Structures are given as C-alpha cells and as structure tokens.
Amino acid sequence: MAVIHHTTLKPTKLELLTSWLPSRPWYRGGPAEPELAKAGGFRLDDPEGEVGIEFIVVTDTSGDRSTTYLVPLTYRGAPLDGAEHALVGTMEHGVLGRRWAYDGCHDPVLLAQLPALIDGRAQAQDQNLTDVPDRDVVATRTGEGPLPADFTTTDDQEGTRLTAPHGPTLRLHRVLEPTPDGPFPSPQGSTGHLTGTWQSPDGSRARGLFAVLYPDLPA
C-alpha cells in the first residue's frame, strides 16, 4: 500500500512536466510554453512498496483550445538502470528526499501493474488519499488469464503503444477526449479498455478512454 505524503516537492510535478511535455511526439501544443493545471488521475500500488506509480491528468491552456494529457509517472529513490531516455526529472521530496521521476510507460513496475489493473488483479487507488480505492477508474476486459507484463513501448503522434511479443497491444491514450454520457461502448476490435474521469477547465466532470486493449497491433 502506497502512503501519500502531503509535503513539498521542488520542483513540482507540474514544473517538471512543463519542460518535458513539449519533447513528446504526441504533444499537441504550439511553440509557447505549456500552461498546465492538474485535472485528475489515480495511483497504483507497487507490490514491493518501493516505487510510486501515478497516472496524472493535466490540462494545457496555452493554446487556442485546451488539451488534456494522461501522463503515467513512476517515482524512485534511485536511478532506474537503462532508463535515462525516460527520465522526466528529479525532485526533492520533503519526506523521502531525492526522487527520480520517469515516464512510467518505460518502467517495468508500472508495466506489470497496468495489465494487472485491466484484468482485475489490481485496484486503482485515490490520487491523494492513502488506502482509498478510486471507483471512477473502470477496467473492462473479455477473455481469461493474466495479461503479460513484458511490453515494448513505442511513442508516436497518436499516443503510446505497449506491445507484447506474440500477444496483445495496449494503446494508451495520451490526449484525452471526453465521451458522451451513457453506457460506454467497447472500441471496435478491442478486448478491453480502461476509462477514467478528470476535471474540465470549466469545472465540469469529464469521462473518457485512458487505454484500449487489442488482441494484436491494429492497422
């Protein structure tokens, strides 16, 4: 169980993301620096209790049209070997000291827990409270048996693909779009999906797709 510490971070997560987001192929902003606000998210527990896992939702209002991003992050007490390319930055945590923040799609701990969430072996946790499930995060899957955790990560303009050898592909939506109210249909050709909520700039609550599971890589 992850313990949430309400303390200081220097720099803050939003400050780190302001510098990092424009370097991503799926970033939709222009030449101006992002103007980010926290819009929601959730956490997952590391079974070993060593790595913090957070799916943070941020909204950029710097352009003519606001854009909301899903950013999975992991927080570690030491550098992750071989993951220099995925380092978002370092922070000084008021309780835990130096923390290394990584793009979680390149961290093996998150890559094990995200499939566990989708196939029901893990529970989404509240972003700000310790040991409180987040019931707004809903996973749906057809089929049986655990999903693999040995994913290869590929970023492109549409988001992030997590591809298992000879197995399924998990498409992570980096740019979030709200969906109409009512029953949530499964995307065509998918075998599962993950939905969640966030706060829109006007203060209303939005729901949309966070990730979609396909039996193989869709064309």
Image (cartoon, rainbow, N blue to C red):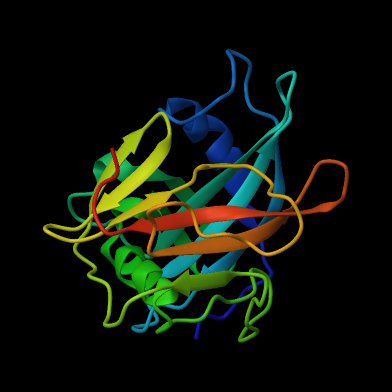
Task: Please give the name of the residue rendered at 65% of the width and 84% of the height, measured from the top-left corner.
Answer: 132
Of 163 and 126, which appears nearest the observer? 163
Quarter where residue 168 is shown: bottom left
Residue 30 relative to residue 87: left or right: right
| Coordinates of residue 188 in the picture (x, y in percent) | 44, 51
Residue 98 relative to residue 33: left or right: left
Asked if residue 190 shows in the view, the reply is yes
| Coordinates of residue 32 in the picture (x, y in percent) | 63, 16
Q: In this picture, is 54 found above or below 135?
A: above
Q: Residue furthest left?
A: 166
Task: Please give the name of the residue rendered at 24% of the width and 53% of the height, measured from the top-left corner.
Answer: 216
Residue 212 relative to residue 138: left or right: left
Q: In this picture, is 126 found above or below 166?
A: below
Q: Residue furthest top?
A: 31
| Coordinates of residue 88 in the picture (x, y in percent) | 42, 43
Q: In this picture, is 63 found above or below 37?
A: above
Residue 119 relative to residue 193: left or right: left
Task: Please give the name of the residue rendered at 60% of the width and 69% of the height, measured from the top-left corner.
Answer: 137
Q: In this picture, is 12 found above or below 122?
A: above
| Coordinates of residue 117 in the picture (x, y in percent) | 43, 74
In the rendered view of the protein, which quadrant contains the C terminus? top left
Of 73 and 99, which appears nearest the observer? 73
Quarter where residue 37 is shown: top right
Task: Please give the name of the residue rendered at 11% of the width and 58% of the height, measured from the top-left corner.
Answer: 166
Q: Number of labelled discs? A: 0
Asked if residue 99 shows in the view, the reply is no
